[in-house]
Image: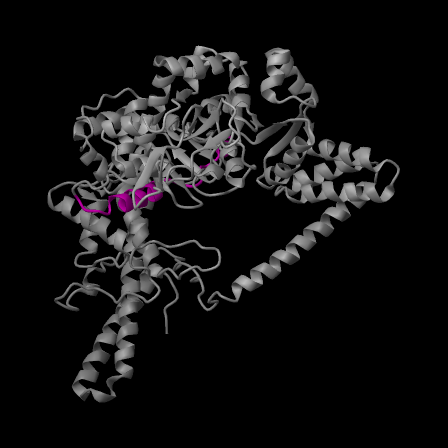
Amino acid sequence: MRIPEETVERIRQSTDILEVINDFVSLKKRGSNYIACCPFHNEKTPSFNVNPSRQIYKCFGCGKAGDAVRFVMDIENIGYGEALRYLAKKYGVEIEEQEQTPEDLLRQNERESLLIVLNFAKTFFQETMQTTDEGKSIGLSYFRERGFTNPTIDAFELGYTLDQWDALLKEGERRGYSRDLLEKAGLILLKEGSTGGDKKVFDRFRGRVMFPIHNVSGRVIAFGARILKTDKNQPKYLNSPETTVYHKSQVLYGIFQAKQAIRQEDVCYLTEGYTDVISLHQAGIKNVVASSGTSLTTEQIRLISRFTPNVTILYDGDAAGIKAALRGLDMVLEEGLNLKLLLLPDGEDPDSYVHKVGADAFKTYIREQSQDFIDFKASRWLSEAGDNPLKRAEGISDVCVSITKIPDSLKRQTLSQRVAQVFHVSEQSVISEINRLLRKQQEQGKKDSERQQRSVDLSRKQPSGHPSASSEPSADDINALFAGVSDEPFQAETPVDAPASGKFYTDERIKPVRAPLSYQEEECIRLLINYGARELEPGITLCQYVLSELHEIDFQTSPYNLILTLFREAYSRGEILTAGDFLNRRPNAPGGPNDIEIQSQAIHMTTPRYEISGGWLKHEIFVPSEEEIAILADSAYRNILRIKKMLAEQRMATLQQLLRESRNKSPEEADQLLGEFMHFKRIDIEISSLLGTVISG
């Protein structure tokens, strides 16, 4: 059901966008704002900007923007109502809602419904372990034998499922959850029966201890389950299948419980198993996660990079552990993270070793035995090579391959010195080998790029730029220039290459041409949003000036025209809209379906990418601010002139085309077209003179 507007406002007032975003990425202060690498696209240099005073965020790389509610919606891929409930729970805001019925669930999107039913299953498994005889004697006893305390069991929400065919199914249906939803969540299985077309329906997890898998925000998205009895027909571990909410390559077990500790310790320990994470967490080493039995993936590494650039891989000391460590090594380096590796004594894993030596000794072992990747690889190559120079050369080349994965050239330079020291060779020979490998990679990349480019239309080019201004405009009144042209609203034709939606894509290979006029429309809207209520002279606001100058002129780019219309409607009621009216728009609120686009545009126009350094003031270097009345008035004046000039140029282009086709028209019609063309030509010349630009021929 819909959350009341007053409750929505309480949630917004209680929310701190820095706290919300810090749950998913590590923010660093820069000036009055905060920055991070964007969680919505892969990048090495931070372009994600958070403005705490306005409670908004903006990525200058991918264009994502919004407030705290929008961030939760985007990062969790959930709806508006579910994002509000998430924030309400986080900040203790009570929402008075009726208990959800099956009909309510049907009205929700599939993702939200799956999260609800998975949370039900988690609670069911917990209660089964704590309240049933089978749960206490088998499930709880197992966790006790592993040494897990009640706080640890609660922190990871561990549970148990009865050794019955349909215990969860019956309880789920009693609660109103459909079989279809339970199946989509990976909780039950449907199989064809042996007779007729009947289907057998039964629980996926039976007679197993349950390890809920959480996403970064703490929502249960899947389960890992371990069987405790000996059954050759059953796998020891059984995981949830991939669903709408669970993609195992993108998830790290324990990330929700570990994220704050990872941020505080500025290092993430990476293990392989559930119990490794739980045992280390209980021992006080809480900055630990696991790849959940899967090979390490790029998505998992990027998830770690949200919280720290430092990773230490903890693997078993056997051959399989060494192989796993080597497999993930280059992937971590390629993502720009700082890597160390630690192999435990043969026969030990993090779970067994921390129980054997204790928390303090384990921390000491990590500190003293962790190796950087060069030492890790070199020790194995050197022990194998002995006096064999060819083997040593092969080892040097192998280490250099790993160095080429590092995107930072300065790091590569530093590490080449380290390789030379470890292998007792000249630094120049190491640098030469790295350069050879880099050239080889570049040549291969060039070949791949050329193959891709053959399928791309190379004829589309980016426009050269904006009109320039070189001198001060005169004080002549230009309002009459457009008077009497037509009784209809003046609307130029939409250029072929101007996207009707106003969204300008940033694909590196194909860059659709953006209409030059759209830049001036954007600048006009930016001035209105930021300074609409400012007085340019006593009694004349910028909003009043702009709207009077643009009388009967509509913008050609959809989002800018929509915002302009909202300003006109508000001004007709005696109001002047401000930035806050756009930044705090509620999705699907009265005002149309474009509120998300409007909010995004407003954030883009109110969030400067760069700030003036405080050092400039220290050295008495002062930069004029556009907020100064004289500068603001001049900016608005020139912007209006450029818009009218471009409209005149568009109209002249249209008239020229009509004149070329005028051979089938009467002399009177041709003379009328020529007269109209000359009218707009005079307008173009006059505005060019006012702007101080070169007059077109």
Residue 631: quadrant of the picture: top left
Q: Which residues are magenta?
A: 591-618
Taking the image as drawn, is residue 286 in sight?
A: yes
Q: Residue at x 22, y 43 (%)?
A: 537
Residue 62 or residue 176, whichever sits in front: 176
Q: Residue at x 34, y 17 (%)?
A: 127
633 to the left or right of 484: right
Q: Could you tell me residue 682's position as x and y percent? A: 27, 71
Taking the image as drawn, is residue 175 in sight?
A: no
Q: Could you tell me residue 313's position as x and y percent? A: 61, 29
Instruction: Tell me: residue 29, above or below residue 666.
Output: above
Q: Residue at x 15, y 68 (%)?
A: 486
Instruction: Tell me: residue 428, above or below residue 71.
Output: below
376 to the left or right of 61: right
Q: Could you tell me residue 112's position as x and y percent? A: 30, 35
Quadrant where the image shows the C terminus: bottom left
Main SS, magenta region, reads: helix
Tag count in the figure?
0
Residue 544 or residue 501, whichever sits in front: 501
109 to the left or right of 616: left
Colouring chosen for the image of the structure: one colour
Quadrant where the image shows the N terminus: top left
Residue furthest right as drawn: 387
Instruction: Tell me: residue 263, above or below residue 103.
Output: above
Is residue 221 in the magenta section?
no
Q: Could you tell me residue 690's position as x and y percent? A: 31, 60
Residue 44 or residue 105, whichever sits in front: 105
